[in-house]
Image: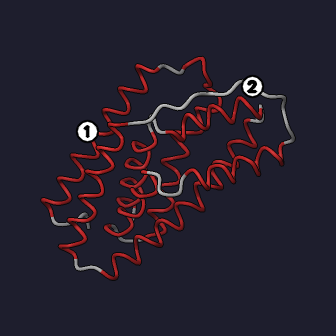
Amino acid sequence: MIEALLISLATVGVAELGDKTQLLVLMLARRFRRPVAVGLGLVAALALSNLVAALFGRWIDSLLPDALLAWLVGGLFVAIGVWTALGDEDDDDDAAPPVSGRRAFASVFGVFLLAELGDKSQLTTVGLSASLADWWVVALGATLGAALVNLPVIWIGHAMQSRRLASAFRWGGAGLFVVIGVAVILAGGLG
């Protein structure tokens, strides 16, 4: 159980490094100027998104033979590595006047719930849940990993943002996903 938690926490945490989620966190934290509301909205959306992804992964695991699942999950990780390497650049908007904490929470929750649909971290959670026991532990680990990587961005803000550092994280994460994908394919599964 602890192994599934740590694997999902680390893998999803790496998937989030330099991801559009971090850029979105920067933008929304700056726009709403409500760090607690932005953080709570982010974590609530991540928890719901990862719960759905883990349940979907568990369902897929029940349908497919282990060998085919290993190829699919390994291929998914390799594809996520390529996706990460290609990256995407988003621009940050100018700051707007502050809004209420409830409005900031609701806005952030809705934006992140939609932004995570089909995101590489959500697909990672699906793959991990299909490969590891205890889908709920995978959901918890994925949520903690994403939160640990994204919550500090709210307070760090633009002062610590560096395109060179983001690029290094993106390429490092891409390489890690390709290595994980190949290892899963060679080993025939994670669990």
Q: Quadrant of the C terminus?
A: bottom left
Callout 2–callout 1 Cβ contact below 8 Å: no
The vertical placement of 54 against 163, above or below, is: below
Q: Secondary structure at mark 1?
A: helix
Give the image's coloring scheme.
Answer: secondary structure
Q: CA distance from mark 2 to mark 1?
A: 35 Å
Q: Amino acid at mark 1?
A: Gly
Is label 2 or label 1 in front? 2
| Quarter of the image with the N terminus in it | bottom left
Query: Where, by quadrant of the figure, is residue 57 drawn?
Result: bottom left
Q: Is residue 37 left or right of residue 98?
A: left
Left/right placement of residue 23 relative to residue 174 reads right
Q: As displayed, is residue 180 above or below residue 95?
A: below
- Callout 2, which amino acid? Ala
Q: Residue at x 52, y 50 (%)?
A: 144
Residue at position x 17%, y 73% in the image? 67
Q: Which residue is mark 2?
A: 95
Q: Position of residue 43 (x, y in %)?
A: 63, 50
